Image (spheres, helix red, strand yellow):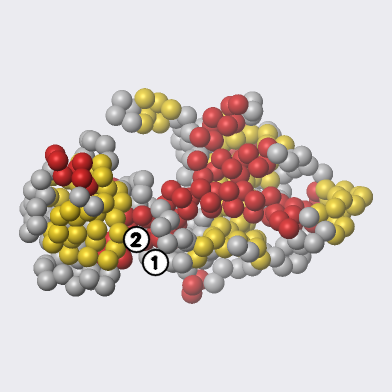
Amino acid sequence: MRSTISTGFSSSIDSVRSSGPITAASSGRSRREVPSVKPLRIGFFGTPDFAVPSLEALLSTPHEVVVVATQPDRGRGRGRSVVPSPVKRVAGRHGIPILQPRRAREPGFHEALSAQGLDLIVVVAYGLILPREILDLPPLGCINVHASLLPKYRGAAPIQWAIARGERVTGVTTMLMDAGMDTGDILLQAEEPILPRDTAATLHDRLARRGAELLLETISGCQAGTITPRKQDEAQATYAPRLEKEDGAIDWTQSAEAIDRRVRAFFPWPGTHTFWQGIRIKLIEVTPLPHERPAAPAGTVVQVERSGIRVATGEGSLLLTTLQREGRSPLPIDRFLSGTPIRVGDRFISSPPGKERSSP
């Protein structure tokens, strides 16, 4: 992993400096004398688990998180019981005032923020688009932590699409927010390798931690005047659209390696699925066998053993080792087969009988 830093920053940072030296040694860089700075009054905007390490990191500093904005409590699970967001739970434990507008333009939201005397707003996976009047509210602007190396993978699902599209390296970016979708000037970036068996869940957790570290580096660097924002290269921009449940439909004409990436990329949500005799089956754990050349159409079961089910794909075979029928628990293949008698020659299809869908 590495961070990239350049020198200089917006003159607005000068307003938060005070006299006297402090020693900075952020993220293993050499120790040096920089001007001391006063603690900032920060508003934190975030909602899911990804944002929690960043909030907790800020709470460990002299800076004061004076207000938290998070999305409204929502019904979850089969019982649709209303639960608070992960960020709200952390804020509640620390006694931080919480705002939960349904829309960022909701009456009273801007006024409530204005009353806090904010120096800076930090946004991490908040989930609402902020209007210009909020972006312009704090004198130091709004810093966003995004889970990709911008301008690649702008959008709502950068972790999942980076795995699905076969990237070997991704990372996190801090940027100054503007009115666009992940188009603001880059402050710092840190790379993170995508490991061969990473799922969205495992990569998510590493990037969340690295994002929290990078956030503190960014705030320190901004206050010290050692960061120069740089424009994103629009020619290099790619997009990571919001995931829908249907994105998990397996297209067996893809290669075994491509299907394996989707299984890992879309775990735990939306998951990947196929259909066998009209029954929806989720793929939980698979192994690609790219060098095999099964003499059968894509989606055909070519071997059934206690260790796994081999399925022909557009290129190679895919070994299914853990599956789940909808509404049931995931099972290793030997146990799964006892209740679902899949046989050699059976076909898996991407959609329920009578429906067709192409994969993006």
Label annotation for residue 166: 1
Label annotation for residue 127: none
SS state under label 2: helix
Work out whether 282 lies above or below 66: below
Residue drawn 27% across the image and 48% down it: 322
Quadrant placement of the N terminus: bottom right
6 left or right of 134 in image: right
Picture coordinates of residue 123, whole percent (x, y): 58, 46
Label 2–label 1 contact, CB within 8 A = yes
Quadrant placement of the C terminus: bottom left
Residue drawn 75% across the image and 61% down it: 29
Residue drawn 35% across the image and 46% down it: 269
Please say whether residue 254 is visible from this viewpoint: no
Residue furthest toward the right?
A: 20
Instruction: Using the rendered view, name the quadrant where residue 89 is placed.
Output: top right
Q: Which of marks 2 and 1 is nearer the N terminus?
A: 1
Picture coordinates of residue 147, whole percent (x, y): 51, 55
Residue furthest toward the front?
A: 306
Residue drawn 92% across the image and 50% down it: 20
